[in-house]
Amino acid sequence: MRRFGEDTLQRTPVKRGEKRKRTRKQKEEAKYRRNSGLAYENSKGEMTHERKRRAAHTCSIRRCHEVITDAVGDAIFSEYWAQQDHDKRVLYVVNRVECCDIKQRRPRSQAETKHPKSVSYKYYFDLNGERVQVCKSTFLDTLGETDGFLRTAMMNRGESVWGTIHEDRRGRQEPPHKLKEETKSAVLAHIESFPSYESENGGEERYLPSNLNITKMYKDYQENDRGPKVSYSTYERLFRLSGRKLSRREVGHL
Ligand SMILES: [Zn+2]
């Protein structure tokens, strides 16, 4: 069921399968709403659902339901979405997930040899100055986040998102070149200007058509003067942070 809500977006019907032409202002509003967890109009002209907190499960291991009461959960949820910023969400999540390497057992098969390192994650909330571990499901349910977002955030955790990822970890160095906000927005807007389609598994990822790759996009950015100059590696880094994915078939050809 689509929700055409009370919001302020003006819209005219768009034909099935057609991409809606949106002004920059409309795109910005959609982006603001998306980052605030509100229902927003996606590039196909469809309204998405607003983010909602889901109650913690009844949990005999970590007592999630007792730790994350409705009041606590609501507070976490609103604090999280009040950030209204994709990078801050990434930062918030990354700083509350700990990753530990699992001691590798002796590989038993070819498949295991290929992926020798496995990791496990622990999920925390900070409650009254104390770190409390919760189950993964409670972590995602409380934030109203998706598994896809979490996975992407963790995948990019080694990246310094313009120095912000590590901002509340003392002793970390800032990256030498901090990208200007203006440059970053220009590149991200450029990346978002390409058509993309939703993943089949209903995750948050959006895939590019198979004829596109980062090299082509970067070339377009450079040659058509789409924004402040950036290096290919910066463009590529921003691409990875944009959440856009290359069509799977194309990945091997880069
Ligand atoms: Zn639990």
Image (tube, helix red, strand yellow):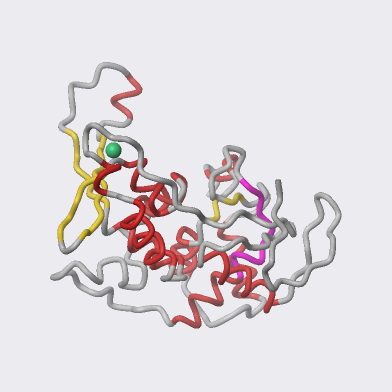
Which of these two is toward me, 7 or 100? 7
Rendered view: 109 above or below 44? above
Residue 149 falls left or right of residue 178: right
State the image quarter where residue 120 is shown: top left
**Location of residue 112 in the rendering, given as x and y in whole percent from the top left corner:** 30, 24
Q: How many marks?
A: 0
- For residue 55, side relative to residue 131 (left or right): right
Closest to the observer, 238 or 15: 15
Image coordinates of residue 1 in percent, x first then y, are: 70, 46
User: Residue placed at 83% from the left, 50% from the top?
Assistant: 16
Q: Quadrant of residue 107?
A: top left
Ligand 1 resides in the quarter of the picture at top left
Q: Place residue 72 in its image quadrant.
A: bottom left
The question of residue 228 being in magenta is answered with: no
Residue plotted at (76% across, 72% down): 10
Q: Position of residue 145 (x, y in %)?
A: 45, 51
The residue lying at 45 percent from left, 52 percent from top is 53
Residue farthest to the top, as pictured = 108
Question: On the rendered structure, is 62 left or right of 227?
Answer: left
Image vertical order of residue 181 relative to residue 19, above or below: below
Q: Residue at x 50, y 80 (%)?
A: 183
Q: Report the front residue among 135 and 92.
A: 135
Q: Which residues are magenta?
A: 190-198
Residue 252 spot, x, y in % from top left: 52, 42
